[in-house]
Amino acid sequence: MSKLIVSATYQEIAPLVKHLKISPPNTNENNLLSNGTLDILITGIGILNTTYHLTKQLLSKKYDEAINIGICGAYNKSLNIGEVVNINEDRLGDLGADDNGKFLDSFELGLESPDSFPLKNGKFINPSIEDNGLKKVSGITVNKVNGEESAIQAMIDKYHPDVESMESAAFFYCCLQEQVPFSAIRAISNYVEPRNRDNWKINKAIKNLNQETLTFI
């Protein structure tokens, strides 16, 4: 079975690369690593990098499965820092317009249908999510991570997300368009709250993420 691991940064995937005895990249982004049976694509952060580099790779080679791994922030306080979760649906959280302090998304603006393929009710949904023992959560993908109380609450009120990342919706979009089975696994490095890096546990999240990925693949 041909698998593609997709990560925004080398930092998030470094323990897995070392375990598989794959040579590390010369730079931190836009790299394709391989041990001959497993490919690892490092796209660079954000929606644009993920969409471009993942689409390019999916068009160049046929994969049986793509797996997005990375860290994320959690809105849902019942989730634990360091916990690894399985995102079963995701959406764009900041595509739209500000209307005198109120955010209107592209559907409310009438710019697109919330059910136009590959969307369903405004979301990208994994049609064949695996039961891998991880908690299934909903996500939002943003260009600017939220770190201000009123913006955080507005996002919760509008979309009720469990987690937030800068790439997952783009990953869902590409895989759905190219009809590649996929999974999205994220480890929680912090809660989405007024920005305070002292509360972030990035190393713990990366360690747990890579350990879980090894058992998953």
Image: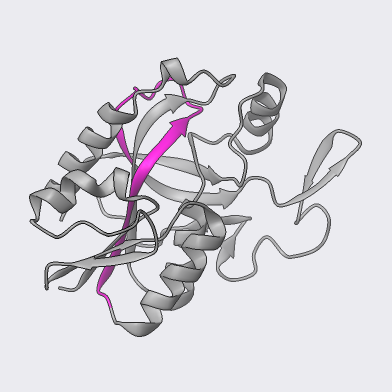
For the point 40% across and 82% down, which residue is it? 59
Instruction: Indicate yes or no whether the magenta region holds residue 76.
Output: yes
Image side of residue 141 versus residue 22, left or right? right
Q: Which residues are magenta?
A: 63-85
Q: Measured along the vertical axis of the image, is residue 7 above or below residue 211? A: below
132 shown above or below 77: below
Residue at image coords 26%, 27%: 204
- Compared to residue 98, the image places residue 197 above or below, namely above
Task: Give the side of residue 29 with respect to residue 94, left or right.
Answer: left
The spot of residue 156 in percent (x, y) is: 62, 30
Q: Quadrant of the N terminus?
A: bottom left
Name, please, the residue furthest toward the right. 100
- The location of residue 44, given as percent across then percent down, is 44, 56
For the image, the number of numbered tags is 0
Residue 116, horizontal then vertical, whole percent: 64, 69
Is residue 82 visible in the rendered image? The answer is yes
**Residue 179 seen in the current view:** no
In this view, the residue in front, 121 or 105, is 105
Quadrant in which the C terminus appears: bottom left
Left-right relation of 155 to 37: right
Q: Is residue 186 above or below residue 162?
A: below
Nearest the viewer among 143 and 182 is 143
Query: Residue at position x 15%, y 60% from top?
Result: 23
- Which of the 4 image quadrants contains residue 152? top right
Q: Quadrant of residue 120?
A: bottom right
Q: Is residue 130 magenta?
A: no
